Amino acid sequence: MNGLLRQAVKFAAVGGGATLIHVLAALTLNSLAHVAPLRANFLAFLVASCVSYLGNWFWTFDAASHHAFSLPRFAALSLSCFALNQAIVYGVVELLGQPLWLAMVPVVAIVPAFGFWLSKTQVFLPKPSGP
């Protein structure tokens, strides 16, 4: 398996785990704790972001960059992904009047692809290739 494909598979695994945590936390907070949909989504996003950063820095990209470099970039990436996520949730729940679980479908389909592209190109610096 080539390097890019290997990273994509690892990113999908980390992202899948983070996404599962996000969706379960959002739905649990909303349905069991009666937290409003946008607030539940935000809290779930924070938890999932921690899982995503650590998994991607240590495993997916095996980053050579220091946390002082990667973490602020990841925070900017996460905020961008969150803005996209919230826009989708707002549109589906508030504008279309649909349930939160339905909003999670486009969130799961769109946000991870955007995140991989920016993680690969802007956030996690690779270790230099040997001569």
Image (cartoon, rainbow, N blue to C red):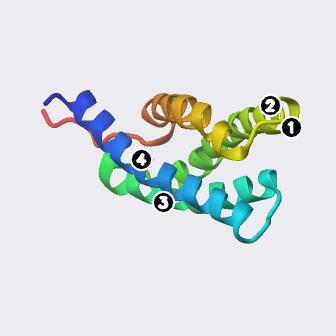
Residue identifier under label 3:
51
Residue identifier under label 1:
94
What mark, if any, has residue 91 been given in the picture?
2
Q: Are marks 3 and 2 in contact (CB under 8 Å)?
A: no
Q: Amino acid at mark 4?
A: Gly
Question: Disc 4 on helix, strand or loop?
Answer: helix
Question: Disc 1 on helix, strand or loop?
Answer: helix
State the CA–CA distance, disc 3 to disc 1. 28 Å
Q: Which of disc 2 and disc 3 is earlier in sequence?
A: 3
**Label 1: how many residues lie within 10 Å, few (<14), some (14-19) or many (20+)?**
some
What mark, if any, has residue 16 been given in the picture?
4
Q: Amino acid at mark 3?
A: Val
- Residue depicted at x 42% and y 33%: 120
Q: Amino acid at mark 1?
A: Glu
Q: Amino acid at mark 2?
A: Gly
Q: In front: mark 3 or mark 2?
A: 2
Q: Quadrant of the N terminus?
A: top left
Q: Is residue 86 above or below residue 56?
A: above
**Label 3: how many residues lie within 10 Å, few (<14), some (14-19) or many (20+)?**
some
Q: Nearer the viewer, residue 34 or 47?
A: 34
Q: Are marks 1 and 2 in contact (CB under 8 Å)?
A: yes
Q: Nearer the viewer, residue 19 or 99?
A: 99
